[in-house]
Amino acid sequence: MINKKFKDSLFTKLFCEPDQLRELYCALGGVTLPPDVPVSINTLENVLYMDLYNDISFEIGGKLVVLIEHQSTINPNIALRLLLYYSKVTEKRVKGNALYSRKHLSIPWPEFYVLYNGPESFPDEETLRLSDLYENPKDLGLPEVLSPSLDLKVKVININEGRNEAIVNKCKKLSEYTTFTAKIRSFLNEGDSLEEAIEKAVKYCSKHGIMDEFLEIYGSEVLSMILMEWNTEDAIAYAREEGREEGWENANQEVARNALVKGLSVDVISDITGLSLEEIEKLK
């Protein structure tokens, strides 16, 4: 059973080993690194996205790389979120009063990626900047400047099937993940329920040797992981449409309601949301 306190997304579960992240980084960065280049995973355990881990943070070759997987419309505030994320990771590296000492500190070179695999139309690549969020100095009655003193760039890469194949095909697990996600959407378009589509995609991939080792180990958890991810997207859309703060606060309840409507069992819904069986029964 999945930990009810938090859940890994399928993406973070799939890329949880240094060798996998090294191969993925080489594909995204268009570089070749020797297999002995160390990879240190330092994902922040207290940074959650709707009770779901969809971030991976790791250091490789003196660089701090933060990856975020997205299923829906790209969040325009993602650069700000990553600025805060990088600050927290860096703060953990600086111990005690080191920040105020005369010693020259060394911090990792940051790189930020968002891997987009949502159903909405999106270009192959796009760069989001922190400076896109800044107020215009002219609107504040200040002189215009050529560039801000602080900026941050995030490369958004579309990894949907048929997009950025030169990147995707350089990383076997990324290619398999793309195929698996595409199969789920294909079965959904044929009229299957989400649960049916996931089960059919698992069978298809197992039969064709796609993510077969992963599915053999985590097969019993895959259904709950993906149901959590996709139903969370429904809850987020609901909250946005309602425009209510409580819509976000009660997102897990909305996920449960969506799952009940789709006919999922109370036990499965409890695994997905972390809500107790009694709470779910009340939602009926």
Image (tube, rainbow, N blue to C red):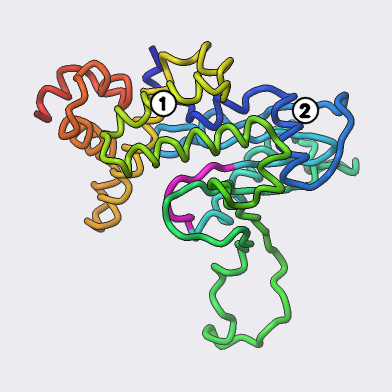
The residue segment tinted magenta is: 68-75
Q: Is residue 262 magenta?
A: no
Query: Tag 1: residue type?
Result: Met
Residue 131 on image: x %, y %: 62, 68
Residue 73, compared with residue 186, is above or below; it is below
- Against 30, residue 271 (above or below) is above
Left or right: 155 as drawn, with respect to 46: right
> Closer to the camera, 11 or 111?
11
- The answer for how far apart the CA atoms under marks 1 and 2 are is 26 Å
Q: Position of residue 94 (x, y in %)?
A: 75, 35
Q: Is residue 7 left or right of residue 126?
A: left
* Residue designated by label 2: 39
The three-letter amino acid code for the residue at tag 2 is: Val
Residue 190 in picture, x, y percent from top left: 30, 41
Q: Secondary structure at mark 2?
A: strand
Q: Which mark is residue 225?
A: 1
The chief SS type of the magenta part is: loop
The numbered mark, 1 or 2, whose residue comes first in the sequence reads 2
Q: Nearer the viewer, residue 144 or 3?
A: 3
Quarter of the figure with residue 257 = top left
Indicate the position of residue 29 as horizontal and vertical percent values.
Answer: 77, 47
| Residue name at image x 63 percent, y 40 percent | 88
* Location of residue 198 by image quarter: top left
The quadrant the N terminus occupies is: top left
CA neighbours of label 2 inside 10 A, class few (<14), some (14 to 19), many (20+): many
Q: Secondary structure at mark 1?
A: helix
Q: Return the mark for residue 276.
A: none
| Front: mark 1 or 2 | 1
